[in-house]
Image: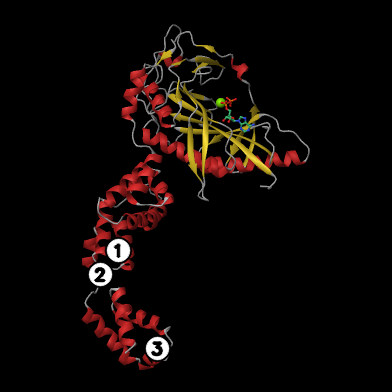
Amino acid sequence: MRQDYEMVIGLEVHAQLTTNSKLFSGSSAEFGAEPNTQTCPVDLGMPGVLPVLNTRAVDMGIKFGLAIDANINRVNRFDRKNYFYPDLPKGYQISQMDYPIVEGGYVDIELEDGSEKRINVTRMHLEEDAGKSIHDLGEDRHSHVDLNRAGVPLMEIVSEPELRTAEEAGEYLKKLRSILRFLEVCDGNMEQGSMRCDANVSVRKKGEDKLNTRVEIKNLNSIRNVMRAIEHEAERQIAIYEYGGEIDQETRLWDATKNETRTMRSKEDAHDYRYFPCPDLLPVRIPEDRIEELKKEMPELPDQKKERFMKEYGLSKYDASVLSMQRASANFYESLVNGNRDAKICANWMMGDFFAALNKAGKDISESPISPEQLGELMDLISEGTISGKIAKTVFEEMFETSRSAKAIVEEKGLVQINDTGAIEAIIEDLMQQSPENVQAFREGKTKVMGWFVGQTMKATQGKANPAMVNQILQQKLQG
Ligand code: ADP
Ligand code: MG
């Protein structure tokens, strides 16, 4: 991107809550059921029905507000957002307009260059999801509607336009997802649509502080796509400004295969929706003691975990933040250290060989073929001197493939490290006898041949000789 421009980005995130039932009815909110099997007259908008608010969803909203240090509005209210669409049988969506449950708060992000940034959250409101129109079944030429999703509870989390790069947007989403998962209020799965993001993007010349016209991009089903779409959209807008054009305020769709955004519709304004307070629902009043109870239920959050990892285990900020971002990896790490193993070496093994192997296998840590106890056993074999660090890497590969224990693999393959001084000395003496010219060279100051001796000794022992001992004995003997 051109250096004289900067991006201005604000994200709207829809997070589907993990309640059992819907926001205003008792229908199941579970994902993946046969179409239209999880609906009731309330979801279908039948005449005469009345919505009843799911208090679990309200609790989840409060917890999120507490997690981002926001104001919880003790009185908040539901409004009707009116529009017509086949997947919205009532003709309106119940949302919160003027009095959302949560206002303010922030999410702190860490950037690759080590810097940190605070992103302020404007608001979070609760609303119901719409159903789903399906146009591409192929067999007949009809469109279909699945109303299982109609009425499923969502949180809409709106950020201030404070993000300045695609990287910042990506880190904000990662941190937000991590908070939602730690709170167990949303599974954060963007591919399945339980966390969705719309990106608002504008560009301006650096140094300006007015906000230019923004474009909203929809259809972003992964963090990577959010980042790519933002970059492409910013380039498109810069090109238009450079040709003296204007940006239309509109909603665009991201096409991940063509790598471009394209017009979906011109942006509607709030007044197009004719918002008004939903007459079927009383304002929500949150008692003070409910908030106090929920405070007690709050889990340790990613940032708190990161701080604790730095203090308790002496990890660097970077290592601590990588290991604490996902609860599964934080738990794995703590079981691996198990109160006694070297915390830094554990972090290195997890973030090195272990994460690389998971990555290569396309597995999440929750699907890891080896447990922290198994990896711990391998690390103990290294620290006791039973195997060398190098051998450990091959043992690890086999463990990862077969889920077998480190000890079993080491025993079966006879990989136990040779720590017997006499045995190593014998091999080295043999070598020196076979190649007196190299001994001579060393003694004449060509210390490079040391490498050759180390290599030969390791070869003679199939890599099993204790490397520290080999070095020490060689130094001694070669120097005569
Ligand atoms: P709407 O419902 O019209 O999309 P919201 O208030 O829900 O409006 O969301 C607006 C989003 O757009 C917020 O995330 C905000 O930070 C962002 N935003 C507002 N103005 C700009 C701008 N000029 N450039 C980029 N983002 C903006
Ligand atoms: Mg919006």
On the image, which quarter does residue 231 sit in?
top right
- Secondary element under disc 3, as helix, strand or loop, is helix
Report helix, strand or loop for mark 2: loop
Q: Which residue is mark 2?
A: 415
Q: Amino acid at mark 3?
A: Phe
Label 1 or label 3, whichever comes before in sequence order: 1
Question: Toward the viewer: 442 or 49?
Answer: 442
Question: Label 1, label 3: how many angstroms apart (C-alpha)?
Answer: 35 Å
Against 210, residue 52 (above or below) is above
Identify which amino acid the numbered label 1 is placed on: Val
State which mark lies toward you, 1 or 3.
Answer: 3
Q: Taking the image as drawn, is residue 376 in sight?
A: yes
Picture quadrant of residue 442? bottom left
The CA span between labels 2 and 1 is: 9 Å
Q: Residues within 10 Å of mark 3 (few under 14, many from 20)?
A: some
Amino acid residing under circle 2: Leu
Q: List the residue tagged with mark 1.
A: 395
Q: Quadrant of ligand 1?
A: top right
User: Where residue 56 appears, x then y in whole percent?
Assistant: 35, 22
Tally of marks: 3
- How would you rate the neighbour count of disc 1 (Cα within 10 Å): few for under 14, some for 14-19, many for 20 or more? many
- Tell me: 161 left or right of 94: right
- Closer to the observer: label 3 or label 2? 3
Q: Residue furthest top?
A: 48
Q: Report x, y in % for residue 385.
A: 25, 67
Image vertical order of residue 76 relative to residue 195, above or below: above
For marks 2 and 1 on the same chain, the one whose residue lies earlier in the sequence: 1
* Numbered disc 1: secondary structure: helix
Pointers 2 and 1 in contact (C-beta within 8 Å): yes
**Residue carrying label 3:** 442
Q: Is residue 357 left or right of 207 when viewed as pictured? A: left
